[in-house]
Amino acid sequence: MYLSLAFGLIPYTLFLFVIVNTPSVNDITVPAVITVIDSSFLLPVLLFAFVLVLLYYVWHLRKQIIHINRTGKEKMDTRLNIINNISQEMRTPLNAIIGFSEQLSYTALDYNQRELLGTVENAAGMLMQIQQNIQELGWLQKGKLHLDTYPFSPYKIFDTVTAKLSSRAHNKHLMFEVSCEGEQQLEVSGDGERLSRILFCLVENAIKYTDTGSVHCYMQVEKLVSGDVQVNIRISDTGSGITQERLPFIFDQYMYNRTSAAGVLHGAGLGLALVRALVELHDGQLIVESTPGKGSCFSCSLSYRGLPPPQTIVVTQQEVSQMTGQFMKDRYILVADDQEMNLILMEKILTRWQCRFDKAPDGVAAYELFVCNNYDMVLLDLQMPRMTGVEVVKRIREDKEPAKARVPVLALTADTTMPGNREFIDAGFDDYLLKPFREKEIYNVIIRHLRPLPVINVPR
């Protein structure tokens, strides 16, 4: 309506302006009805029409921008979904690679074979880190990544991460220096896994871009007067450094931030972007100082709520004996998974533990086996054909025999988008384990839910 009015007024006012200002020709007088219109009236009308046209243009431009943003967001969401789906699919073959490599390490291997196996394990570990970085960046962009809260020791996490990466530094003949100040027994409440990820990415990044010299890892755990604990982290290296031109962009995703001395690009460009996002989730700031040719230093400070000193728990000899393979001997386990490689891996693990077990390729077969046998534990994959793991556990909990209905059931899943522990328990599971996992991890989860076997006294 406004557009029609604007375009209608423009020619009309121009026509009046021409008529009014046209001089008389051949003594022909202009009609009085027209001459009464003063030319000064035309300027506001033209201005009003121009404003209307300008408003329409702004409205139309805004509409186009909204459409472009909506289309761009849809494309971004589609890209994130594709990347997340790919990262999810990576977990199943990674479970096989990591699991079978671990089982192979228990066999008799010569030096060259163990060296090759170590290379495979390192490559699998790198793939796992990339998968986790992709997954968490996707959660961050969707606003779904939040910090958990539970007790942990910053020193133990620092020690674990540096010990895990020290071999990479030594393989490059680098001096790997580790120092920690503060109370090593201090425990805090926060997200220890995210702290581990921050440390791992920063230390790995320093080793990656340092060809000669050293990498220094420093952490200070400081208890404040308020009772909070501040963890100060500083990771420095003598690597290639970062130019001033590149420095503002080093936290961009998919940006190759540095090259080694040989000019080789490394990494997927995700680590530092994730580190900065995780540090900001802690209300901290990641600071970088770098000199090309001399090295770089990354530092940040994270705050946690301090906890009282942990009580020392004396482990009895009986508890130690339960951590051995004897605790699992002769247990009867049901394993259900639609991936053949996962069933073979579990077969190798359970055989090492001297367990009896049955395997099922889908949910229906798993439930049929459960009905016909008395198991000590059931391990269920969630996404199975014919009947999902959630449907199977619901039927188990509805069994007429109380003892069978109470059998421990664990969920095994590669889906990182699944809900937390509370939702699994509400569905009927006793616990869950995320693929890929190592033998020690699944062992620790299983023994938490298995009752000790009755001791049979054999008369002498």
Image: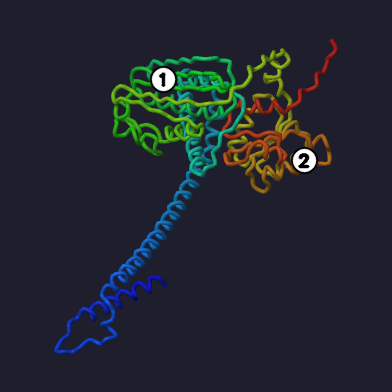
Q: Is residue 106 visible?
A: no
Outermost residue toward the left?
26
In the rendered structure, the answer to whether residue 247 lies left or right of residue 77 reads left
Mark 1 or mark 2, which is nearer the start of the sequence? 1
Which element carries disc 2, helix, strand or loop?
helix
In the rendered structure, the answer to whether residue 251 lies left or right of residue 164 reads left
Nearest to the observer: residue 201 or residue 228:
228
Nearest to the observer: residue 386 or residue 162:
162
Outermost residue toward the top?
460
Q: Sort mark 1 into few (<14), some (14-19) or many (20+) by Cα contacts within 10 Å.
A: many
In the image, what residue type sits under mark 2?
Arg
Nearest to the observer: residue 27 or residue 214:
27
Q: Please determine whether, in this image, residue 188 is positioned above or below residue 6.
A: above
* Residue at which label 2 appears: 397
Count of numbered circles on the image = 2
Q: Is residue 380 visible?
A: yes
> Can you give x and y, in whole percent of width and height, for residue 366 in the image?
71, 41
Quadrant that contains the C terminus: top right
Which element carries disc 1, helix, strand or loop?
helix
- The residue under the point 46% across, 22% down is 233
> Can you give x and y, in whole percent of width and height, for residue 264 in the image?
32, 30
Q: Which mark is residue 141?
A: none
* Residue at which label 1 appears: 169
- The residue under the point 71% across, 40% down is 426
Q: Please determine whether, in this image, residue 206 is positioned above or below residue 184.
A: below
